[in-house]
Image (cartoon, grey):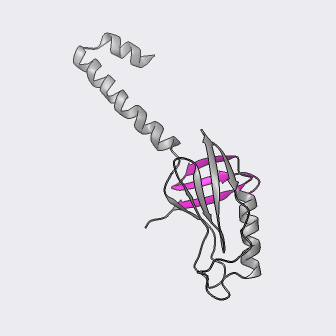
């Protein structure tokens, strides 16, 4: 309402400048707050398991296709977004171990962690950005950070 009064009562150049500022600021603020980080490698905020450096990574394409790299295995997925709601569907875990894994990399603990993380991801219902991270809410809260490389 204040903006409307200023636009109605101000000079033409002031109105033009205000309209331009509003047009430029509107999409930027909405985009910064609402856009999901598509095509970024989102790395799970977790401690490494043993000497293996691999951490789970979620990558989501703008069309909703996703790749979920777990502690040991990788599955394809589908992500549906509507505002701050999210639904993640994932293919079942493959039976075989990845061919590029080093000997002993997929311990029973890491394979159980694959199952647990996949279950947690498929139960998330909301997402948000918080302090540079992407946070998924569900029965288990999951924090991801965009890869810096």
Lateral position of residue 52 relative to residue 29, left or right: right
Asked whether 140 or 36 is in front, the reply is 36
- Residue at x 59% of width, y 47% of height: 128
Image spot of residue 67 (x, y percent): 59, 60
Q: How many marks?
A: 0
Q: Is residue 27 above or below residue 75?
A: above
Q: In which quarter of the view is residue 55 placed?
A: bottom right
Asked whether 145 or 68 is in front, the reply is 68
Q: Quadrant of the N terminus?
A: top left
Q: Residue furthest bottom?
A: 103
- Residue at x 59% of width, y 56% of height: 66
- Residue at x 74% of width, y 52% of height: 123
Please say whether residue 138 is one of the residues in the magenta stretch: yes
Asked whether 18 or 69 is in front, the reply is 69
Q: In which quarter of the view is residue 149 placed?
A: bottom left
Asked whether 32 or 4 is in front, the reply is 32
Image spot of residue 53 (x, y percent): 57, 79
Q: Is residue 102 above or below residue 114?
A: below
Please say whether residue 45 is one of the residues in the magenta stretch: no
- Residue at x 47% of width, y 37% of height: 30
Image spot of residue 92 (x, y percent): 74, 62
Q: Residue furthest left?
A: 13
Q: Is residue 77 above or below residue 20?
A: below
Image spot of residue 146 (x, y percent): 50, 60
Q: In which quarter of the view is residue 119 placed?
A: bottom right
Lateral position of residue 12 relative to residue 58, left or right: left
Q: State the extent of the magenta-drawn residues as a range.
A: 122-145
């Amino acid at each position: 309402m204040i903006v409307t009064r200023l636009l109605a009562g101000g000079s033409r150049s002031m109105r033009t400048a205000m309209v331009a500022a509003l047009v430029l600021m509107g999409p930027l603020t909405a985009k910064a707050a609402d856009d999901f980080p598509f095509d970024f490698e989102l790395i799970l905020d977790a401690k490494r398991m043993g000497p293996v450096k691999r951490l789970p990574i979620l990558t989501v394409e703008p069309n909703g296709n996703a790749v979920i790299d777990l502690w040991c295995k990788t599955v394809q997925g589908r992500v549906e977004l509507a505002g701050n709601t999210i639904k993640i569907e994932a293919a079942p875990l493959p039976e075989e171990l990845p061919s590029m894994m080093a000997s002993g990399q997929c311990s029973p603990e890491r394979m159980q962690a694959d199952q647990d993380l996949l279950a947690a991801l498929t139960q998330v219902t909301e997402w948000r950005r918080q302090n540079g991270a992407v946070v998924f809410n569900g029965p288990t809260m999951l924090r991801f950070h965009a890869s810096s490389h």
